[in-house]
Image: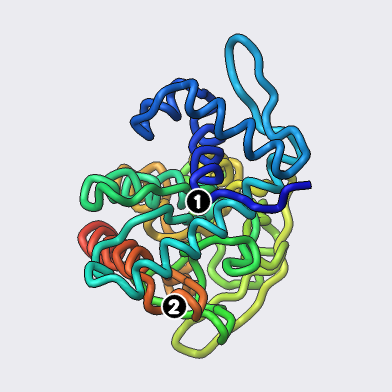
Amino acid sequence: MNNQLSNDDLRVFTRVAARSSFAEAAAELGVSVAYVSKRIKALENALNTQLLHRTTRRVSVTEQGEKVLRWAERILDDLDQLFQEVADTRHLPRGQLRISSSFGFGRQQVAPAVSVLTDRYPELSVRFEVFDRLVDVAGEGFDIDVRIGDDIAPHLIARKLADNHRILCASPDYLARRGEPHTLAELSEHECLVIKERDHPYGVWRLQSDTGEKSVRVKGSLSSNHGEIAVQWASEGRGIVLRSHWDVSPLLASGQLRRILPEYYQTANIWAVYPQRLAHSAKVRAGVEHLVEWFSARLSAL
């Protein structure tokens, strides 16, 4: 096995994997399709494994190719960071920035912010992924995780993007049918739309008020791992939901939902979290500053 790998070959491979096409990767890199094919073949020979499945219509990454892709992205990321730290132009972000977030918040709020990031920094490429679990930022190779909730491990750097809290809501139809609860204890008698999403303890709502924090165990006939689904059910009169203010504010304004037990809330601020080793990364700094500006303009007023 020839273990002399070319960084250029790794970069070509990542672009083919991202585009699922030799032609599109070639166009992006400004080279010929024949050159791309040659570099992929050289990389496969060096690693003695097949990296891509090729058909007449598309290209897909093999199981071994997925492993190589993860390593290639890390290697290229480290090289980009090296150049950023030693070059005179290190203040200019370049390379790939990997950002993660949760399903609903990621789709609704983070994706629009990410989509314009490359307009500001043409030498930056962004890979954005969403999950229904808390991401191990450093361990999974991400640069920034945009998350809701203040429970952040001390070995990570966190920058607050916006203040946020979760509130209790239900539709007027549900409240007319079942009655409005006036104490937390009464929630146990109601249909509560339980969400298993990232940092939510399943079936337990921890809420703050002027008198401190209280916990209440809730249940209902409907539950989901997706907050948007629970909000939709709540607007249809299916039960009570605990959801972020940014998520339900349009429905509160339209009257589709009504806040209940307004003295109670759950702190759930919005953070950009990244590993200590990336504290001086130009691309991470640019990404975080962009997110701060974006969310300050859109969510802080809610």
Q: Earlier in the sequence, mark 1 or mark 2?
A: 2
Look at label 2 and name its amino acid. Ala
User: Which residue sits at x=66%, y=33%?
Assistant: 61
Quick one: which residue is furthest to the bottom in this view?
211
Numbered disc total:
2
The answer to whether residue 301 is visible is: no
Q: Residue furthest top?
A: 56
Q: Nearer the viewer, residue 136 or 267?
A: 136
Residue 158 shows which numbered tag? 2
> Relative to residue 111, is residue 86 depicted above or below?
below
Element marked by disc 2: strand
Q: At which x and y percent is residue 69?
A: 62, 46
In the rendered structure, are the residues bearing label 1 and label 2 in contact, judged by CB atoms less than 8 Å apart? Answer: no
Residue at 65% across, 58% down:
133
The residue wearing badge 1 is: 170
Where's residue 214, x and y in %?
A: 61, 82
Is residue 86 shown left or right of residue 74? Answer: left
On screen, residue 196 versus residue 232, left or right, reads right
Secondary structure category for the residue under label 1 = strand
Dot 1 crowding, Cα within 10 Å, few <14, some 14–19, many 20+: many
Indicate which label's residue lies in the foreground, 1 or 2: 2
Where does residue 46 sit, x and y in percent of width and height?
Answer: 70, 43
Neighbours of disc 2 within 10 Å: few (<14), some (14-19), many (20+): many
Residue ID at (71%, 52%): 3
Measured as percent of width and height from the top left, residue 110 is found at 39, 52
Which residue type does callout 1 highlight? Ala
Residue 188 appears anywhere in the view: yes
Residue 43 circle label: none
232 versus 212 height, above or below: above
Name the residue nearer the viewer: 116 or 167.
Answer: 116
Q: CA distance from mark 1 to mark 2?
A: 33 Å
